[in-house]
Amino acid sequence: MERWFAVFAKPRQEAVALTHLERQGYQAWLPRASVACRLRGRWTERIEPLFPRYLFLRVDPYSVDISPVRSTRGCTGFVRVAGHPAPVPDPVIEWLQQSIDPETGLHAVGRQLAARLRPGDRVRILEGPFRDVEGVLQQVRGEDRALVLLQILNDSRRVSVPAEQLQRVDSPERKAG
């Protein structure tokens, strides 16, 4: 019976491993995500593996020879438990496949504001002059700016901050509901 298995890849070689596994006729899958990273002082989006150094392979190890996987370019070998390739539970793979954005084919993680925050959310500012100050997200302005309502010196002020500097603060009501 075919199952999904995790394959360990060499550092930054996940795409190479994927290509060479597929060339050998294996059904391989590399989940990817758009991740925010800082480049020359600016935040930019970059497509990276969702699980660095790991990809998935669907195979029946009892009817198909899996020994070539270990020597495939970019691969180190299977993730093993007690010396045997460890299958990834089907519900995990199903959840991962269902959580892919159908338009981009990527997972929504990291600093993507629309995926993380909504107006009315309680947020904490992580960087800059208002570091560690909490407020309420009022409005999202474009892809990289947000308007936050802060209580400063007994007065309410709206402050525009870079979206990547915000983190949602879970309130007790939110956790209970």
Image (cartoon, grey):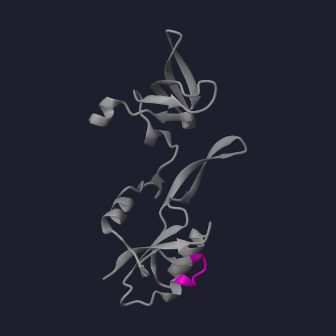
Residue 144 seen from this side: no
Q: Residue at x 49, y 88 (%)?
A: 67
Q: Residue at x 39, y 85 (%)?
A: 61
Q: In the visual, does 123 lie left or right of 88?
A: right
Location of residue 42 in the rendering, given as x and y in whole percent from the top left corner:
67, 41
Residue that extends furthest to the right in the rendered view of this protein:
40
Residue 4 placement: quadrant: bottom left
Q: Nearer the viewer, residue 80 or 141?
A: 80
Q: Is residue 47 above or below residue 87?
A: above
Q: Is residue 36 above or below residue 51?
A: above
Residue that extends furthest to the left in the rendered view of this protein:
177
Q: Which residues are magenta?
A: 70-75
State the predominant SS element of the stretch in magenta: loop
Q: How many marks?
A: 0
Location of residue 148 in the rendering, given as x and y in whole percent from the top left corner:
50, 24
Q: Considering the image in quadrants, where does the C terminus appear? A: top left
Q: Residue at x 46, y 86 (%)?
A: 66
Q: Considering the image in quadrants, where does the N terminus appear? A: bottom left
Residue 28 in magenta stretch: no
Residue 90 placement: quadrant: bottom left
Location of residue 48 in the rendering, given as x and y in whole percent from the top left corner:
56, 58
Residue that extends furthest to the top in the rendered view of this protein:
154
Q: Is residue 98 above or below residue 126?
A: below
Residue 145 seen from this side: yes
Q: Residue at x 61, y 32 (%)?
A: 127
Residue 6 placement: quadrant: bottom left
Q: Is residue 67 above or below residue 133?
A: below
